[in-house]
Image (spheres, grey):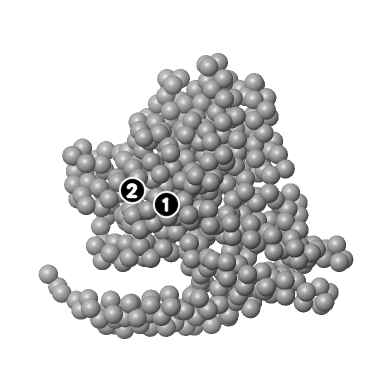
């Protein structure tokens, strides 16, 4: 076997990685300069005929790319819903890169297959979901939702005698998919991938916090007969709100009792982890009565990209929708084949990062992480409200805050964009905007395990300063 100089490569990567991580407390949260032409010039180094020393390649890559990196693992990154990188997850990623396991089959990579199986079992227990539930590790929330909805499609059609994996959708009994108004785009995209097009959806009205109205769901289902899929949210991407899982479960039980095969999926990309925090119990009551749940490990759990988790109460449906057989594969041996629970053949053992992070945090640490992000979101909301320069639009029940900046000329959306741009250019923090019910607002998402009170206060100071500057300049 050819033996390269692993140490020089790892030393180069270690030095550059540690310099980056050590810079996070004071590093600009977004690059101070984003010049496409300059980035291309810095990185456009075509392969030479004779190649290069690997350690030199790593050193140059770190040098050339580092100025253009966003500090997504910073405690002051509040854009979108982006978690940081827990140290245990980082350590697991280093090992996974070195081990280079293609985590598809138990016989070929038994160690990581078992680690993923345990991580899935621990997560299901931590969330209080049915013990018989299966879980698959996928690339993110999008594919987790896709995987769960594929299982849903399989099961509701199986119950009316149709094998969708064998016979496809042409000629199949129609499936009615019920979504809430303003359902997340990843849910709609997953339905598109599955041949359950967007125009065929039934949309149900929501309340002023974007939570589905159970009575509106009951009304919509009165006209629905046959296979049915309902999608809900555990943490709305704008308001952070939770659907009423108990009320929805009651409505769906009645729909099933009338002879309609029904599956309820919960998009929990933002806040499924709330089910692990006792302080959030009232928001997630009834969650365990539903059928599938999807989430992003790289949001609140703070594991490395890419890691989504698809969980299904009905393991048989989950496996039927995802598994595949081939003569050349070594399947069916003792142990769990990871490829039976996700849509990939070749894949890295992303569930090992979940294994490591859960062990490092412990059950109390996971609960504390969730509860701290909610407390810090409320700290943001309180400080901005008290300033008189902004209004918080949503009820802050989780880690999301919607902010209307108060412009003297009434153009609140323009002011919101100006404030976000100013803070972003300064590098103190990163906030992203959203258009919510026709209004341009600033959205704050507290998702990083490293964020503390000082980060919030520093970010608030920058926001208020740039609001004053923007108003003065207008």
The reply to whether callout 1 and callout 2 are in contact (CB within 8 Å) is no
Residue 260 falls left or right of residue 130: right
Nearer the N terminus, badge 1 or badge 2? 2
- The residue at the point 53 percent across, 53 percent down is 371
Around disc 2, counting alpha carbons within 10 Å, would you say few (fewer than 14), some (14 to 19), or many (20 or more)? many
Front residue (pair 197, 470):
470
Q: Quadrant where the N terminus lies?
A: bottom left
- For the residue pair 445 and 397, the one nearer the viewer reads as 397
Note whether 470 is above or below 217 in the view shown.
Answer: below
Residue 191 visible in rendering: no
Where residue 325 sits, quadrant-wise, is top left
Above or below, comparing residue 289 to residue 193 in the picture = above
Which label was assigned to residue 364? 1
Residue 467 is situated, as x and y percent measured from the top left of the image, at 75, 71
Task: Report the residue at 41% width, 63% height from top.
Answer: 86
Where does the C terminus fall, quadrant-wise? Answer: bottom right
Position of residue 328 measured from the top left corner of the image (x, y, whole percent): 20, 44
- From where the camera sits, is residue 293 visible? yes
Residue 210 pos. (x, y %): 67, 43
Left or right, 293 with reference to 421:
left
The residue wearing badge 2 is 119
For residue 470, side relative to residue 371 (left or right): right
Residue nearer the viewer, 411 or 225: 411
In this view, which residue lies farthest toward the top?
Answer: 258
Give the answer, above or below, for where 329 lies relative to 62.
above
The image position of residue 124, as x and y in percent, is: 39, 41
Q: CA distance from mark 1 to mark 2?
A: 16 Å
What number is the disc on residue 383? none
Nearer the observer, disc 1 or disc 2? 1
Give the residue at x 47% y 79%: 23
């Amino acid at each position: 076997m050819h033996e390269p100089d692993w140490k020089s490569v790892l030393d180069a990567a270690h030095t550059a990685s540690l310099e980056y991580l050590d810079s996070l407390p004071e590093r600009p949260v977004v690059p101070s300069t984003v010049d496409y032409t300059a980035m291309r010039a810095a990185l456009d180094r075509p392969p030479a005929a004779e190649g290069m020393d690997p350690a030199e390649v790593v050193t140059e890559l770190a040098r050339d790319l580092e100025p253009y990196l966003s500090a997504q693992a910073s405690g002051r990154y509040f854009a979108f819903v982006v978690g940081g990188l827990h140290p245990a997850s980082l350590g697991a990623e280093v090992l996974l890169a070195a081990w280079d396991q293609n985590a598809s089959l138990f016989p070929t990579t038994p160690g990581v297959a078992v680690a993923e199986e345990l991580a899935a079992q621990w997560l299901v227990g931590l969330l209080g979901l049915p013990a018989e539930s299966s879980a698959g590790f996928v690339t993110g929330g999008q594919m987790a939702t896709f995987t769960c909805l594929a299982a849903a499609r399989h099961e509701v059609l199986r119950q009316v005698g149709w094998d969708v994996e064998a016979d496809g959708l042409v000629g199949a009994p129609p499936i009615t998919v019920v979504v809430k108004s303003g359902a997340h785009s990843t849910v709609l995209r997953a339905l598109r991938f599955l041949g359950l097009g967007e125009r065929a959806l039934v949309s149900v009205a929501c309340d002023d916090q974007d939570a589905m109205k159970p009575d509106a769901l009951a009304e919509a289902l009165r006209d629905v007969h046959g296979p049915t899929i309902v999608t809900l949210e555990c943490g709305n991407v704008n308001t952070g709100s939770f659907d009423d899982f108990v009320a929805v479960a009651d409505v769906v039980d009645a729909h099933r009792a009338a002879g309609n095969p029904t599956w309820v999926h919960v998009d929990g990309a933002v806040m499924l982890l709330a089910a692990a925090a006792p302080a959030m119990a009232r928001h997630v009551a009834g969650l365990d009565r539903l059928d599938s749940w999807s989430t992003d490990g790289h949001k609140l759990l703070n594991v490395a990209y890419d890691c989504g988790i698809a969980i299904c109460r009905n393991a048989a449906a989950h496996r039927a929708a995802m598994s595949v057989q081939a003569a050349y594969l070594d399947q069916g041996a003792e142990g769990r084949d990871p490829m039976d629970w996700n849509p990939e053949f070749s894949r890295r053992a992303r569930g090992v990062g979940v294994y490591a992070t859960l062990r490092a945090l412990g059950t109390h640490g996971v609960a504390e992480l969730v509860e701290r992000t909610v407390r810090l979101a409320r700290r943001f909301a309180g400080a901005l409200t008290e300033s008189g320069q902004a209004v918080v639009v949503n009820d802050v029940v989780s880690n999301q805050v919607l902010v209307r900046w108060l412009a003297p000329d009434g153009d609140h959306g323009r002011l919101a964009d100006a404030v976000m741009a100013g803070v972003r250019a300064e590098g103190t923090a990163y906030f992203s905007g959203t258009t919510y019910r026709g209004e341009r607002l600033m959205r704050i998402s507290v998702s990083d395990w490293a964020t503390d009170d000082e980060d919030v206060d520093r970010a608030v100071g920058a926001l208020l300063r740039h609001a004053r500057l923007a108003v003065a300049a207008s």
